[in-house]
Image: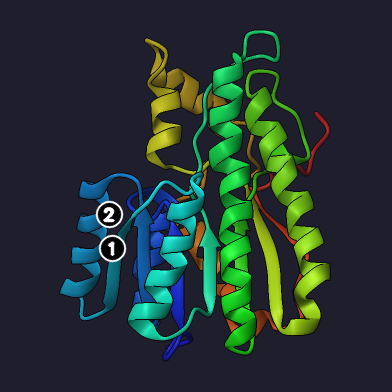
């Protein structure tokens, strides 16, 4: 029960990595604020936690909006008295080369993937400092430091998350707040599965992607959730400002 007595806010917790993390954190004793813009998915995730005897509260929010981001932190404090853990996990993705990416798509991806992380940190850090410290985990990507020509906006936003993580870690470490980010490769989430379904021969595309990995597969959401739990826990007490690569060997080779 690593998180007994702890309060965690997890964004994008209605599905994928966020849902796996919400369930795991609750199982480990945390009181979880489940944040998602999709009401049905958010409520389903909360019900699943409650049915297993955990503690959870839903928060229907758009993390790119200031009022919503502030409200999710306030819900944690008002319902549970504090916030100890923030997992900025919510993200969107859309294919597009630099020239083909519209300004609207660029703004949408940056608003959720980068501004959403900024806002979560902005409102969580003062509450964490007041409570004696805490741990923030930001969802970045291996695409924050290697390129994909068809995901220009996504790459740029995730690179920003890595830089923001380092800056925040330096600024607030002396006040007991640790800030780290996770850089996964592909994970079997609804977003990635939608990518596989974009072509008529989706199984061939899947196998082509798998072949790029040393482990010849992509990650399950729970495998990333376990890393988030480590970063949130006291087991990582001397870890801050780090970009933890969890990519099954995708980026370890040149050819």
Question: Taking 190 as reference, is 166 left or right?
Answer: right
What whole-number distance in Å separates the C-alpha atoms at marks 2 and 1?
6 Å
Q: Please, is residue 253 above or below residue 177 in the view?
A: above
* Res 8 label: none
Describe residue 52's horizontal placement relative to residue 170 as left or right: left
Q: Position of residue 36 (x, y in %)?
A: 36, 51
**Label 1 SS:** strand
Is 184 placed above or below 222 here? above
**Nearest the eye: 134 or 191:** 134
Along the line of sight, the residue nearer the viewer: 65 or 57: 65
Q: Are marks 2 and 1 in contact (CB under 8 Å)?
A: yes
Q: Which residue is mark 1?
A: 58
Residue 254: image quadrant is top right
- Category of crowding for the residue at label 1, using alpha-carbon neighbours closer than 10 angstroms: few (below 14), some (14–19), many (at least 20): many
**Image coords of residue 102 (percent x, y):** 59, 13
Q: At 40% across and 19% down in the image, what residue appears?
A: 202
At a point 66% along the width and 14% down the height, the residue shown is 97
Per the image, label 2 sits on a secondary structure element best described as helix
x and y percentages locating residue 95 in the rendered image: 55, 20
Label 2 belongs to which residue?
Answer: 42
Between 63 and 137, the one nearer to me in the picture: 63
In the picture as drawn, the residue positioned furthest to the front comes out as 67
Where is residue 13 drawn, in percent x and y?
38, 56
User: Residue 21 is drawn in which quadrant?
Assistant: bottom left
Vertical side of 105 occupied by 51: above or below: below
Q: Which corner quadrant of the image does residue 199 belong to?
A: top left
Instruction: Mark 2 or mark 1: name the one nearer the start of the chain.
Output: 2
In this image, 49 relative to 225: left or right?
Answer: left
Against 158, is 235 above or below?
below
Decide: few, some or many residues near mark 2? Use Cα within 10 Å; few <14, some 14-19, many ≥20. many
**Residue visible at 32% across and 52% down?**
14
Q: Is residue 1 visible?
A: yes
């Amino acid at each position: 029960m690593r998180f007994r007595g702890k309060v965690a806010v997890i964004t994008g917790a209605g599905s994928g990595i966020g849902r796996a993390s919400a369930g795991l954190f609750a199982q480990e004793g945390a009181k979880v604020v489940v944040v998602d813009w999709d009401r049905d998915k958010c409520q389903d995730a909360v019900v699943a936690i409650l049915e297993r005897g955990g503690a959870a509260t839903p928060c229907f929010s758009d993390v790119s909006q200031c009022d919503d981001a502030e409200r999710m932190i306030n819900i944690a404090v008002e319902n549970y008295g504090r916030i100890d853990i923030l997992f900025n996990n919510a993200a969107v993705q859309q294919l597009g080369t630099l020239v083909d990416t519209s300004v609207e798509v660029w703004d949408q991806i940056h608003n959720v993937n980068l501004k959403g992380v900024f806002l979560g940190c902005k409102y969580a850090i003062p509450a964490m400092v007041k409570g004696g410290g805490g741990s923030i985990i930001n969802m970045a990507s291996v695409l924050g430091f290697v390129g994909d020509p068809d995901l220009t906006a996504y790459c740029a936003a995730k690179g920003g998350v890595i830089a923001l993580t380092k800056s925040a870690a330096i600024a607030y470490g002396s006040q007991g707040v640790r800030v780290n980010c996770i850089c996964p490769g592909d994970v079997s989430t609804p977003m990635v599965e939608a990518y596989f379904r974009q072509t008529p021969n989706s199984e061939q595309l899947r196998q082509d992607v798998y072949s790029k990995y040393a482990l010849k597969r992509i990650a399950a959401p729970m495998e990333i959730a376990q890393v988030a739990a480590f970063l949130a826990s006291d087991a990582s007490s001397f870890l801050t400002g780090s970009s933890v690569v969890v990519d099954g060997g995708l980026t370890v080779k040149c050819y």
